[in-house]
Structure formats: structure tokens, C-alpha cells
Amino acid sequence: MPTSLVVLLWHYISAFLAPVVLQSFPEIQYLDFRASMRRETSIAIYERTKLGRRWLRKKVKIPPLKKDGTLHLKDDWQGIFQLSWYEQRRKKWQNVKGRVKEDERPFLSDAIQQAKDKSTYLSDPLQQAVDQTPGPVTRKKVATEVA
């Protein structure tokens, strides 16, 4: 019973004290429980649509899945999808890439799979997972686009 009490105490200390204090005790680094307390990062999927001259982002509601966790064929449409999440109070965006070719529009199932991969990558506190999704959205330079 005293062992579990010690573990609970270290759990409390590692969750609420500054990491600087924990770094001063190198022999107890393995008791850092902050890693197990992190929540899974939620990733939202948006679809880009054009209305007149303006491009809009419309949040996608995920349709009901089959028992095996895949989409029905009627719900798996193609579109221009983007993933969004928050990192350090800043909203981040990332384009969804198609599974077949770069010039082909991705399916909703691709967006859902990439959102799961990104959430797993961002939720891993020790960054042991490999980021399998493409990089963030970058703005194009006018000089390179005109030339």
C-alpha cells in the first residue's frame, strides 16, 4: 500500500510542479507521469468550397461509419479537405493529400485517416510516433508564381 501512495504523490508532483524542479532529480525521471496525463488532440476536418469569388471553409460532419470503422461508399466524396488543430493557442492548418495521385482530389476517408494519424502524432508526449501526414499549409510567394 505505501508504494501506491508514493506513486500517487509523484503523480501529483509531476503534474503540478514545474519541470525544472523534476529535472533536479535525475534518478527519478522515470516517474514523470505528465506523459500519461495528456489528452488526445482533437483534429477538425474542413472542406474548402468556392462561393462566387470567395473560398470558404465548411466544417465536415463525419457520417456514421460501418461496423468495421470505414465509410459507406455513398458518404465517401471527393473534395478539397484541410485538417485543423491547435498548438500552443494557435490554429494550425494542413492540406489533405490524396492516396492515389497528387493532382487528384482526396476522398473523405483519406481525410479521416490522416486526421487520426495526426492526432496520434500530436498526442504522443515523447514524440515516438512518426508523423505520416504531409507538412503544414504554406503560402505561395507571388514572385515564384508569376515567373
Image (spheres, rainbow, N blue to C red):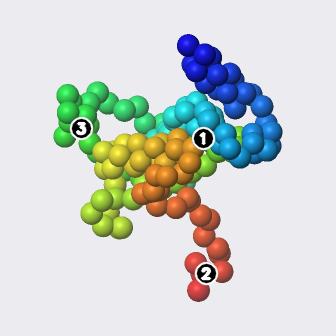
Callout 3: SS = loop
User: Residue reaching furthest bottom?
Assistant: 147
Callout 1: SS = helix
Q: For the residues carrying marks 3 and 1, which lies nearer the camera in this image?
A: 1
Q: Which mark is residue 144?
A: 2
Q: For the residues carrying marks 3 and 2, which lies nearer the camera in this image?
A: 3
Q: Is residue 46 visible?
A: no
Category of crowding for the residue at label 3, using alpha-carbon neighbours closer than 10 angstroms: few (below 14), some (14–19), many (at least 20): few
Residue in the image at 66% along x and 80% along y: 143
Marks 3 and 2 close (CB-CB < 8 Å): no
Q: Position of residue 10 (x, y in %)?
A: 67, 27
46 or 114: nearer the viewer: 114
Q: Position of residue 31 (x, y in %)?
A: 62, 35
Q: For the residues carrying marks 2 and 1, which lies nearer the camera in this image?
A: 1
In the image: residue 3, left or right of residue 132: right
Q: Which residue is mark 1?
A: 30
